[in-house]
Amino acid sequence: MSRRRLGYLLKHASLRLAEVTGPALEPYGIDGRELAVLTTLDTAEPLSQQEAAQRLGIDRTTMVAMIDALEAKKLVARRPHPGDRRKNAVELTERGHDTLRAAVPAVEEAEERFLASLSGEEARLLRDVLSRLV
Amino acid sequence: MSRRRLGYLLKHASLRLAEVTGPALEPYGIDGRELAVLTTLDTAEPLSQQEAAQRLGIDRTTMVAMIDALEAKKLVARRPHPGDRRKNAVELTERGHDTLRAAVPAVEEAEERFLASLSGEEARLLRDVLSRLV
DNA sequence: CACTGATTATCAGTAACACTGATGATTACC
DNA sequence: GGTAATCATCAGTGTTACTGATAATCAGTG
């Protein structure tokens, strides 16, 4: 049974989750990956693109395209980094903060719908177990 | 924390799992997707390509390419379907059966290594919970 | 039997995603 | 001062999986 294989389960769980979170984020004009970038950038001190990429576990060149898209939507801004002109200090704009504040509850609600068939204990354990594996 | 987001966890769990199962399957010349197709095709009555695609939850056109690759490796064969000349009856070859028999234990061992940090109960529950979500 | 509509496999084209490797600018080291 | 490392960027590539079109075949209807 290939349906029992862990790779199959993780992949299809991702697909089914995206079917729920995608529409939930659509009103905010972003997708799940962009929400993750916004969340990562929402720190006290602004990050360089490379720092953000490392924290999120994505490639540096992928982050360039992500920031390009978010900047085009006026959700983030590249600023000169104080003290190192090689770096960009990437900051959320006012609009970026607003979008983040509104999108996070929307996606959390979508996740809960996705997990609706589980008990609270099971849902908690799923997150916990996945966190340890990652 | 974007690291708590379910989409992030599922995606990165998939990536980390692939890092383990990929090398485990490499000696057999197949990847995880191809193993899933082989497993799906290992039935009493041979399936058409479309039936196999539906069981596996992938697109019909994707299955064409998968079967092309597996046929080139002599692991499966397209036969005329008895009673419906529109269909192909896709069968495992002798070599396909051998590969499947050897690769399944290898990938299961890799999965266990991936799950090594979990208790047996947690591992069992992870599979169970994911199955219900898919 | 002839006709219409559905089904199957295939192909070309496309899109999303994420990588490698190279480049220019800047910084750090010694 | 000169060399090596770091950062952002870009062009190119590879993987994956889709849409839409086509030809062959089958099923059902009158």
Image (tube, coloured by chain):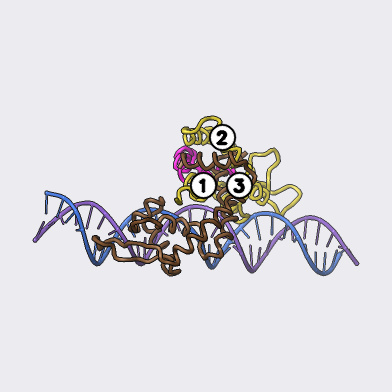
Chain colours: A brown, B yellow, C blue, D purple
Read off the magenta span: B15-39
Q: Disc 3, disc 2: CB below 8 Å?
A: no
Q: Nearer the viewer, residue B16 or C14?
A: B16
Q: CA distance from mark 1 to mark 2?
A: 32 Å
Q: Position of residue B72 (x, y in %)?
A: 54, 48
Callout 3: 10 Å neighbours few (<14), some, many (20+)? some
Callout 1: 10 Å neighbours few (<14), some, many (20+)? many
- Mark drawn on residue A4: none
- The disc labelled 3 sits on which kind of residue? Leu
Q: Position of residue D19 (x, y in %)?
A: 61, 64
Q: Nearer the viewer, residue A100 or B113?
A: A100
- The disc labelled 1 sits on which kind of residue? Leu
Which of the chains bears the disc numbered 3?
Answer: A
Q: Secondary structure at mark 3?
A: loop
Specify whether residue B12 is painted magenta.
Answer: no
Query: Mark 2 highlights which residue?
Result: B98
